[in-house]
Image (tube, grey):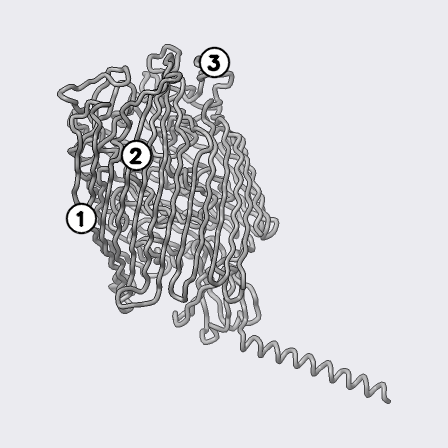
Amino acid sequence: MACRTNRTFAKVSNLRVYLLFISFAFTFQFVFGQEITVLDKFNRKHIPNAKIECKDLSVRKVADLDGRFNLKDFYSCDSISVSYSSYSTGYFLVADLKNVVVVELSDVKLDIDGIDVTANRWKQEKAEVPGRITQLKIKDIDLYSPQTTADLLESSGYVFVQKSQLAGGSPQLRGFGTNRIMIVVDGVRMNNAIFRSGNLQNVLSIDPNSLEDAEILFGPGSVMYGSDAIGGVMDFTTKEAKFSTDSVRRFVKTNIFSRYSSASNEFSSHVDFSFGTRKFASTTALSYSSFGDLIAGKYGNDHFLRPTYQENGLTVQNPNPRKQVHTGYDQINAIQKFSFQANEHLRIDYGFIFSTNLKDAPRYDRLTLDDDNDGNLDYQEWYYGPQEWMMNRLALTADKKTKMYDEFRTVMAYQKFKESRNDRKFGSSDIRRQFEEVDALSLNIDLHKLFGKRTTLFYGTEAIYNKVGSKAFREDDDTTTVINPRYPNGSTWQAYGVYASLKYLLTDDWILNTGMRYSHYYIQADFDTSLFPYPITSTVNSNGSLNGSLGLVYHPNKTSQYYFNASTGFRAPNIDDLGKVFDSEPGSVVIPNENLKAEHAYNTEIGFVKSFKAKWKIDAAIYYTYLQNALSRADYTLNGQDSILYEGTLSQVQAIQNTGNAHVYGIQGGFEISLAKGLSLFSSISYQKGQELDIDSAVYYPKSHVAPLFGRTALRYKRRQLSLEFYSVYHAKVSHDDLPLNERNGASYARDENGLAFTPAWYTLNFKASIFFNKHMALNAGIENITNQLYRSLGSGLSAPGLNFIISLKATF
């Protein structure tokens, strides 16, 4: 009887403990809430900072760095949406979530809501912006395996890239390139006083493995970004220091990455480490890449091969003409960032970025020149010294609402640019060395203020100061002779601007965007007439520019957007335009011209994005840009002479001039189709045409930096822990008559049956794969140019990689 009583008592006791546990769990959940984690449905990685909102928008929260949020905050809601840029928005009933700990988002995004972009220097909904903005999929960077940021831009399918050497990559947007497009890094303009009209390689200083976000804003962006933003703006955000949250006392994360590619015998490694508490955060990143000589494809035009090369002062036969001898280089990139949360409303950020080449980077297109066709190459040596870029950035952000602003940010930056050119002609005992450096200071103050529920004002000011250092020598054994530098040493370029932009919701469906900016620039330069017969000893060039924009968006639902915009842009002449002396090509010399004015662009664009039943999406934009007072190179005179003896060669005198005008028009389009679960088809295409006035003949010719028809089509399959992509990249033929006038005798082009320069059409077939073993380890592999095509993109002096095998491994802890 006692045993039975004890067993009964034990059962009752166990029941009481169980009920007590349930009661405690319920009380704990009620008091402390239920934590839910937002995950990527494909690779099961946590999605940080996802937006969670009630259906009626009465409650809005952001998940922490581990993707966690508290459901208790939404108990008053019937349903919530969970969204993050480039993911499909998830919709959930709150009642259904009370028994789950995880929600998943898919990155197959066929609607247009829930995507934030930096259009007015602040994040805002992409669907409310009257223009075309392409976001690069940084989370897919491991799959694409770009060697450089130029390759990353090209992978978007909307950016055309020219390459003169392997250590190069000059982007082009809508028929404009080099100093007519803007590069912005962490809110700071990278364009400086010596950005030239010839192809630029500065985008290679940005490490693709250290990017947090990247966007391409097409069309003039001068209202927000000032001079140079005519063709568009490439806006890069590097890895940010991240604070811990209430649910995580310390945030610690490490990424390690290594890659090998066969065509250039490339070895790359990257490591980054992040640490954060609630008040202090730090991020450190380091990348190193080593590239050997690039192997070109096998099947194509033989003009793109390398039959001879330089060795020990002689021209020798190349045993493997596909091997582009003297193309290899090394590069190192480093980032250090600190963030301090001073109080609830004030954040202070400091960032240091450094990039350099560890050895000289050969200029391949010059090394292959044989202008007299005598079998002897023109140059024994031609290389860039290490291209160095350093940036120190200090930012203060305040979000305590005042009468003047809802959010305020000021960014102060100091940048240092160094570059050099070194060339020796065959048979010459001396070498010419040119060294340039730019000290760049900038200050940006940006504010925004919401008035009621319909009006948002963005406004701010900018100040820029650049000082150029330039020197040159000619060395012969132990003798060093000072010669005229490329730029006037000690010259300065300054720019100041003030802007305001307004977003107004006319109705729930119609949104008006308008803006205006006034900019003023000032150039001062002194010329040393003891080294070169300059027609002047000093000059000052100063002027202002007023620019504006007007746009209208119709956004009737989450699957449709239609927009129109009209805008102006400008580019102020810089030190490279006004004060440069250099031999642009054999037999030509460019000299300074003090009588320059700013060039102005007038642009209009209409476009749309439309999604159908979450199965497919199509988008397109048509644009036209007119360039007035275009700055371009044309024949000139020096002291009444049209030719002078320069570097031992009788050369035609030329100068940058406001030659007249130019225009570009085109269309960009793309589509995405969800074919089946996990299987999608993507395609993008760009077509553009442009003409510019030749001042000497008063005839319009094809404009430089206008790409041919080009595009990218991809078939992607995704399932848990596996991603596969088969894609093709293509480029239309450019005939001799469609080449710019000054490029029709270019040595880098193929030759047709009549011996005339042209660029053949080409395409490549490629395959990439990613395997996620778990949330800590991933393997990426790929084959590029499967059919081993031998080709070059328009204007490139370097042949593209042939058959290329890529493998990389990434670990995250």
Spatial CA span between label 3 and label 1: 57 Å
Front position among marks 2 and 1: 2
In the image, which disc is placed on residue 317?
Answer: 3
Q: Position of residue 31 (x, y in %)?
A: 54, 77
Q: Which badge, 2 or 1, is on the more N-terminal residue?
A: 2
The mark that comes first in sequence, 3 or 2, is 3
* Residue marked by disc 1: 546
Q: Amino acid at mark 2?
A: Gly
Whether label 2 touches label 1, CB < 8 Å = no
Up-down: is 441 above or below 793?
below
Is residue 402 placed above or below 186 in the rendered structure?
A: below
Front label number (3 vs 2): 2
Between residue 597 and residue 94, name the one nearer to us: 597
* Residue at the disc numbered 2: 469
Q: Residue at x 29, y 56 (%)?
A: 446
The kind of residue on which mark 1 rests is Leu
Instruction: Identify whether 328 is placed above or below 234.
Output: above
